[in-house]
Amino acid sequence: MTHALRRAEAALLHWFFAPASVAPLAAIRIALGAILVLSVVQAVPHIEWVWGGDGLLRHATQSYPSHPMVGHAPLVFGTLALSAACFSVGLATRVSGLVAAGAQATIASAGLWHSWGWTNAIPVFVAIVAVSSARNMASVDAWWARRRGRPLPTVTPRWAVRVLQVHVAVVYIAAGWHRIDDRGWIAGEMVYAAVANSMYTRLPYIDPQPLKPLFSLLTWATEALELAAPILLWARRTRVPTVLALMALHLGLELSAIIGWWQYMMLAMLVVFLPSAWPERVLAPRPSQTPTPRAVAG
């Protein structure tokens, strides 16, 4: 029994701490930072109207007059934009990432009704990436370390990869599970409802009625994929096809409906399940002298 427990402990430690390439973490860092910067750019025309000292937030409910966003929105958004830009390019990555996560969490806490959900999830992802080895590749920090003759390792323990993988799997568990008893999803109506709703659709000039059977199939396929994803993402043979299918799902949703930056965030996070060689070809095309595991997910 003791021998079996030791073997299980060793396997768990290897699963969680075995060396892996930092390329997926670097790719996610670049993408999440860019998403936060673009979200600020998109919000600029509405900052004072929604979050200002005499804005909608202050008058919508009595619980917000003392919120840090009220009257200080430009400062919070400016801090987010600057720190997220530094995080994306890898300048003082850990500090800038944690500051960006805090600023984004502050904005998200100002009201769920304007957050689209992604604003509450992305600070967690950014914080995990910030304290990881994501700065060790394709970053100002890595460039400066090389200049000083102290290059940062491109292969490090993969604990951050595992933590992110677990978080992504939990996102799909939450997404699929709460729809099991939803009558709209059971009846195959939700994709049609999103496309037909003038508030969410990106296709206002297309009559969705003739395509309703297709939308029903897409609704059921979406539910089935999200329910199966938390299992299929962990199996070697099904991992990459599942990631590609999920990426196609998020791209399709982005092209057809307006749901904030959720789709872009999930597209970035799914990189954590891809073979590390894929982001390496983009971020570090020249072969490294340090041996790199073939797949981050292992």
Image (cartoon, rainbow, N blue to C red):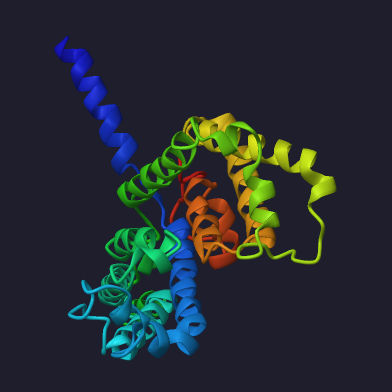
Residue 189 seen in this snapshot: yes
**245 relative to 81 in the view: left or right:** right
Tag count = 0
Q: Residue furthest top?
A: 1
Front one among 116 and 250: 116
Residue 243 location, x and y as percent? 58, 44
Can you say whether 56 is above or below 12 in the image?
below
Can you say whether 76 is above or below 108 in the image?
below
Residue 285 seen in this snapshot: no
Quarter of the C terminus within the rendering: top left
Quarter of the N terminus within the rendering: top left
Residue ID at (29%, 43%): 17
Residue 2 location, x and y as percent? 14, 13
Residue 8 location, x and y as percent? 26, 22
**90 relative to 5 in the view: left or right:** right
Residue ID at (69%, 65%): 202
Residue ID at (65%, 50%): 193
Q: Residue furthest left?
A: 2
Q: Hey, which quadrant is residue 108 in on the image?
A: bottom left
Can you say whether 242 is above or below 115 in the image?
above
Residue ID at (47%, 70%): 30
Residue 161 location, x and y as percent? 38, 49
